[in-house]
Image (cartoon, rainbow, N blue to C red):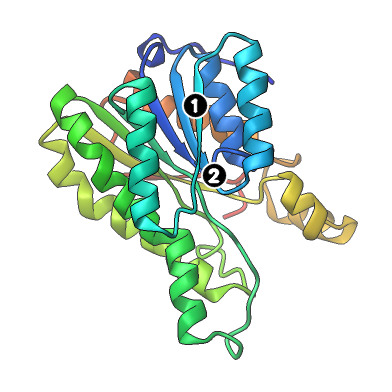
Amino acid sequence: MKYGAIYPSLKGRTVLVTGGGSGIGESIVEHFAAQGAKVGFLDIKEKESKALAARLKRKRQTVHFEPCDLTDIAALKSAIKAVRKALGPITILVNNAAHDERHTLEEVTPEYFDERIRVNLKHQFFTIQEVVPDMRRAKNGAIVNMGSTSWMVAFGGLPVYTAAKAGVIGLTRGLAHELGKSNIRINSVAPGWIMTERQKSLWVTPEALQQLMKDQCIQRTLDPADIARAVLFYASDEASACTNQSVVFDGGWL
C-alpha cells in the first residue's frame, strides 16, 4: 500500500467507515489507520472484517470492528454507539457501504426497490444523523459520502442502484448549509470503475478492460487506494475550505 501524503490533522481522530471490511472500504480503513487515526468500521462480512482488524492491530494501529447489517437502522445506531464507546467521539465519517447488484426494469418489485434504497442510500442519512452530535460538540467534523459515476455515464443494468447513487448528491448538498454552521464539512466522492476483488471476479473481462481504456483518459485501471487517498484529503484539514462538493475520480471516464 502506498501511503502518499501524511495529514497531521487526522492523527488521533476517531473515524467511522461503513462497509469497511473489503474493497474500497478496506483500503480506506487501512489508509486512515496508517495516518494514526482511530478507525471504527462496520460491515456485514464478519470473516473478512475480523481478519482486517487483526492485521492492523498487529501493526499496533487502532481499529475497532462492529458487525452490522446497515439496512437495520436500530442495529446501525447501536453499532455506532459501540464504536464511540471503544474509540471516543466520532469526528470523521465515511459513508462507503453500497452494493451494486444487477437488475432489470422488469424484474424490480416494490420490495426489491425499497431494499436497494436501504442498502445504497438510507443508511447514509441515518449514520450522519447519529454522528453529527459528536461533531457539533467538537465544533469540527468531516463527512465523505461515497457516490458513483454510474448514473453520470448512464450505465445500464442496475437502475435502482444508479437512482440511489444520484440521491447521494442530493443528500450531500441538502445537508451542507445546515452542517456548515457547526463547522462540519460534507462532500461526496464518485469513483469510476475501481478494480476491487468483487469487480474482478464478477465483471472484469479482457473485452471490458479494452473498452474501459478507450473511454478513460488515463490509460491504467484504478484500484481502491486511488479512492482511499482522495478520501483522506477531503477528511483532513487540508480540505477545510471544501464542502458541498461532489468530486469524480474515474481516470477521465466522464
Q: Position of residue 147 (x, y in %)?
A: 46, 52
- Residue 165 visible? The answer is no
Asked whether 10 or 72 is in front, the reply is 72
Q: Position of residue 83 (x, y in %)?
A: 39, 31
Asked whether 89 or 66 is in front, the reply is 66
- Residue annotated with mark 1: 64
Q: Residue at (40%, 27%) from the top-left corner?
A: 15
* Mark 2 residue crowding within 10 angstroms, few (<14) / some (14–19) / many (20+): many
What's the CA distance linking mark 1 and mark 2?
Answer: 11 Å
Q: Residue at (65%, 12%) from the top-left corner?
A: 58
- Which numbered disc, 1 or 2, marks the residue that appears first in the sequence? 2
Asked whether 118 or 24 is in front, the reply is 118
**From what the image shows, is residue 22 above or below residue 85?**
below
- Left or right relative to 13: residue 173: left
Residue type marked 2 = Asp
- Residue furthest right as drawn: 206
Q: Position of residue 234 (x, y in %)?
A: 39, 30
Q: Quadrant of residue 60?
A: top right
Tag 1 and tag 2, C-beta contact below 8 Å:
no
What secondary structure is found at the residue carrying circle 2? strand
- Residue annotated with mark 2: 43
